[in-house]
Image: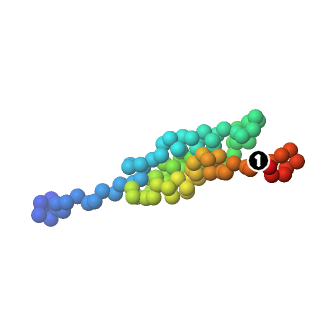
Amino acid sequence: MPLQPSTLNPQPPPPDTRLIERWLPIAEIGIESLRERTPMTPFPAPNRLHVWWARRPLVASRAAILASLLPANADHEKFKHILGIHGEPGSQQTPDSPSSADGRAI
């Protein structure tokens, strides 16, 4: 038995938009993924020497999964904090006070 037009809901359900559809910090995720892959030493990173199966997913994968689960009105700063994106590492630090060669403050 086909549905009658009077029994159909005339209004579509409200859209269920996700954060990934409205906003995703692509530039910040790219910078963080470079930082994640670049070793801080002249030697290769340990994860390049052998496959490490228990390693956590890369930041781009974590961002895509998290953004697809969160609603569109989620807090952007909290999203970045959960991913571990805290901005430039040196920008939050205060410069050291000048000192002499023996460690005394000038």
Q: 22 and 102: which one is in front?
A: 102
Return the x and y of residue 51 as percentages of the image width and height: 69, 42
Task: Name the residue furthest top.
Answer: 42
Q: How many marks?
A: 1
Q: Residue at x 11, y 64 (%)?
A: 6
Q: Going by the image, does 54 lie left or right of 65? A: right
Q: 87 and 36: which one is in front?
A: 87
Identity, as a three-letter code, of the amino acid under mark 1: Pro
Q: Is residue 58 visible?
A: no
Q: Which residue is mark 1?
A: 98
Position of the N terminus by quadrant: bottom left
Q: 6 and 57: which one is in front?
A: 57
Q: Going by the image, does 81 lie left or right of 42? A: left
Q: Residue at x 63, y 41 (%)?
A: 35
Q: Is residue 29 visible?
A: yes
Q: Residues within 10 Å of mark 1 (few under 14, many from 20)?
A: few
Residue 31 vs 72, above or below: the answer is: above
Return the x and y of residue 4 as percentages of the image width and height: 12, 61
The quarter holding residue 10 reads: bottom left
Q: Going by the image, does 25 lie left or right of 106? A: left
Return the x and y of residue 74 as percentages of the image width and height: 43, 58
Q: 30 and 103: which one is in front?
A: 103
Return the x and y of residue 40 as percentages of the image width and height: 72, 40
In this picture the colour scheme is rainbow
Q: Residue at x 73, y 49 (%)?
A: 96
Q: Give SS at disc 1.
A: loop
Q: Residue at x 39, y 58 (%)?
A: 73
Q: Going by the image, does 54 lie left or right of 9? A: right
Task: Name the residue furthest front.
Answer: 106
Task: Name the residue furthest bottom.
Answer: 7
